[in-house]
Image (cartoon, grey):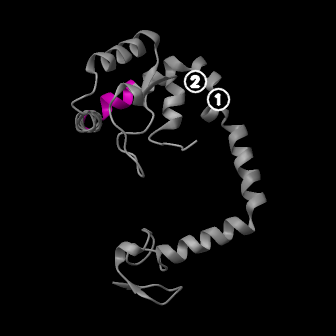
Amino acid sequence: MKICSKCGVQKSVDKFYKFIHGPDGLQSHCKSCANTKHKEYCKANLKKIRVAAAKWHKANPRTYDPAWYKANSEKIKANIVKWQKANPGKVSARVAAHHASKLQRTPSWANLTEIEKIYIDARNSGMHVDHIIPLRGKLVSGLHVPTNLQLLLPIENMNKSNKFDIV
């Protein structure tokens, strides 16, 4: 238990952000107070934040530029392979979790032949197979069925990540 220096309420230590320079390794104020302070700062400094973000994006165009990804695809692939070789345990865990979620989200009535065809088409065209409604979403979880699958460019799929936007 720890007392928040801002609101004065005693809370469990999991209600405080980590801060390695603090005497107990935690911030002096709770997450709720820290979030409120951050929101106030953002509201008061919106223009400053937008200018800094625009400056950063201008200096780092590759983060949102599909042309950069296309021009550097070999370099990107090499870096991914390098990371995978350096982190085989993490790769195995991700693959296992993905396969398990697919198995849990594949109903008995799913057309497995059609699903397989979609994956073959993706491999032949250099595309990624994406679940429109993610298998393990925060708010909603989809099924591993053909109607929930779509082909996306690799960069689009990585940008979409595990999100589902209601349109």
Residue positioned 55% across, 70% down in the render: 35
Residue closer to the observer: 86 or 90: 90
Whether residue 116 sits left or right of residue 34 in the image: it is left
Which circle marks residue 115 in the picture?
A: none
Q: Which residues are magenta?
A: 81-89
Q: Is residue 132 above or below residue 150?
A: below
Separation of marks 1 and 2 at Cα, in angstroms: 7 Å
Instruction: Classify 10 Å Cα crowding around label 2: few (below 14), some (14-19), many (20 and above).
Output: some
Question: Mark 2 sits on what residue?
Answer: 69
Q: Is residue 152 above or below residue 90?
A: above
Q: Is residue 9 above or below residue 142?
A: below
- Inspect the image, locate mark 1, and give the three-letter code of the amino acid beneath it: Asp
Question: Mark 1 sits on what residue?
Answer: 65
Q: Is residue 86 magenta?
A: yes
Quick check: marks 1 and 2 in contact, CB under 8 Å?
A: yes
Residue positioned 54% across, 29% down in the render: 156
Is disc 2 placed on a helix, strand or loop?
helix
Quadrant, the C terminus: top right
Relative image position of residue 116 (x, y in whole percent): 30, 17
Relative image position of residue 44 (x, y in whole percent): 74, 69
Relative image position of residue 17 (x, y in whole percent): 44, 69
Q: Most prominent secondary structure in the magenta stretch?
A: helix
